[in-house]
Amino acid sequence: MFFNEIHERIRFVFLVCIVILLAIIIKVFYIQVFSYQKLNTLAENLWSRKLPIKADRGAIVDRNGTILATNVTTVSLVVVPGQIKNPEEVAKSLSSILNTNYQDMLAHVTKSTSIERVHPEGRGLSYDIAEKINSLGYDGVYLLKESKRYYPYETVLSHVLGYVGIDNQGLSGIELYYDDYLMGADGAIKYFSDGKGNKLELTEVYEAPTSGITLQLTIDMDLQLAIENELDNAFSKYNPEQALIMAMNPKTGEILAMASRPTFNSNSYQKYSSEIINRNLPIWMTYEPGSTFKIITLSAALEEKTINLFEDTFYDGGAINVDGATIHCWKAGGHGSETMLQVVENSCNPGFVSIGQTLGTEKLMNYIKKYGFGTKTGIDLNGESTGILFDQAKMGPVELATTSFGQGISVTPIQQIRAVSAAINGGNLYKPYIVGSFLESETNSLIKKNEPEIVGKPISEETSSLVRFALESVVANGSGKNAYIENYRVGGKTGTAQKVKDGHYLDGNYILSFIGFMPADDPEIVVYVAIDNPKGVTQYGGVVSAPIAKSVLTSAIDILGIEPSKEGMAREYTWLDKKYLILPNVVGMSKKEATAALKNFQIEYSGSGNTVVYQSPASGYYAPEGETIKLLLN
């Protein structure tokens, strides 16, 4: 009995041992077969270290592929403190080569961390310095390839492009707004070390970085350079406080050019104040628009049919009284009796007060909001402002009157150019945008494309046609004459807005503006110019800003391939103006007849014979008196 109990115990212990052994075998099998990958990864993570390799940011190009932002290769210094055997010697050598403080470098090489990046003195090293460090051959000292953002045009388009920080992150402009697209995915060199940081003799693994996406803008660099040149000239000539020019395709909402002054160099943004580098005036600046806003009032009245451009009249005596407040016309004594078209041509404030009164507060404010004023346009740039409108519930007769001619409210340039684009393009309000396409960085193959987006329709095509006619007449016969381009159809409106500070208007301090478009019958480009407080010149938008807009539009003729037209409105010239005459057709005439017909011009003959077979410029177009006309004889 006693021996039976012993045998039972032995068998039990043996059975328990067999079960335990079997469990261990099953566990080992499970670990080796099912958990191998997981455990191997965990072990590898304990041994592995990564030397980061920064990805190249995606390039930024204009609509024609011109590079606006790219990268240059640089070298950066990284140390692995655990691998450095003689930290004092290493710190002394590195601080000597980099011309930095020894104690600071010693702190880097002895820091209790797996990898230490030496910056800023170890970033963007020159080839010579990198070679000196490499020749030392120290363990734990590494030189890594990195890329640095580079803007080949420096100050051009700087507020739009923005800039990047020391770690290649976008901080402003497109660089910030599209940072997730541009930054790419960093790579690394993976190596293995023990718990003390000593490098293990295992094969290193190279994980390649992935470059960011290339952004193709709607900007046309040729047009951009043209407006940059005009801004430089304006700053040199008028010494204004600020200035801006922007151009938009009114049929799509694409931004074709955008610039402002003061400007900065995106490659060295640290040298400039935050007020300069972080304020993109065309989308950030808010001010009373002045008479360019009359386009909105005009279109609303035409849409509501409260006025007729040709039949309705207004008598301008030089001022109008509204609820005890006197509103003056810019012309002393006024313009006398005018048609509504002449009210527009003459930019007559009392006349526009009358137009606003035909609409009333509710209708006028309704159209202003339909045009997008008081809200952000949604353009793909950071830092956009909303502008300020009157509280409609608190608007009285005076507020209605001043709003009618663009005073008392505050708008942004991007709101203004978008609204005017809608007024002349058939009535479609577009969401403005500046990035047109997203491209794969290596092949430039299209990933996706931004398309025009209509967000409203404040007026009809019929009304828009009348607005275009009226604004072409402003340039041909009214206050916008300085923007007239012979043989091309140009429309536009001047603006002279008195600036406000602390609730009071400043004496002799104006923002002079002009918004123009061409061709007037089928606009392909809208240009907005605003010059803040120019010095030593008559304070009118038609005097300062209209000629600048004319220069930009003249550049756009060749850049956009705009054809001349014989259908435009003829400008009335005074004796002070350079005289333009319509060229007669002399093809088929004899040499004597052609000479008589072109008596007001210089003639250059070529070929032999007595009959004209070709003339340049062609007949029917305007040419300045005294210009050389080339005739081919046969």
Image (tube, rainbow, N blue to C red):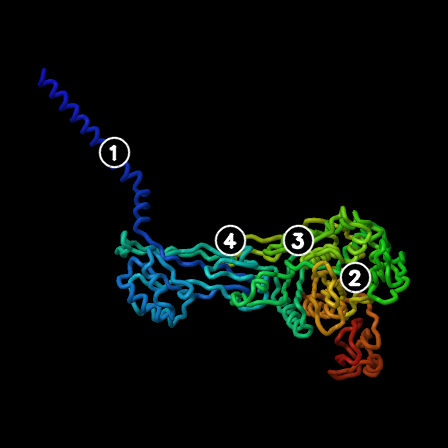
Where does the image place residue 214, in percent across and percent down from the top left? Answer: 52, 58
Dividing the image into 4 quarters, which one contains the C terminus?
Answer: bottom right
Q: CA distance from mark 1 to mark 2?
A: 89 Å
Per the image, the residue denoted by label 2 is 471
Outermost residue toward the top in this view:
1
Q: Is residue 88 above or below residue 614?
A: above
Q: CA distance from mark 2 to mark 4?
A: 43 Å
Circle nearer the N terminus (2, 4): 4
User: Mark 4: few, some, or many residues within 10 Å (few <14, many ≥20)?
Assistant: some
Circle nearer the N terminus (3, 4): 4
Where does the image place residue 189, in percent across and percent down from the top left? Answer: 35, 57
Discs 3, 4 touching: Cβ within 8 Å: no
On the rendered structure, is 416 left or right of 131? right
**Front label number (3 vs 4):** 3
On the rendered structure, is 198 left or right of 582? left
Frontmost residue, 486 versus 589:
486
Circle nearer the N terminus (3, 2): 3
| Mark 1: amino acid | Ile
Circle nearer the N terminus (4, 1): 1
Per the image, the residue denoted by label 4 is 180
Discs 3, 2 touching: Cβ within 8 Å: no
| Mark number, residue 26 | 1
Residue at the location (76% across, 76% down)?
615
Circle nearer the N terminus (1, 2): 1
* Label 2: element kind: helix
Per the image, the residue denoted by label 3 is 386
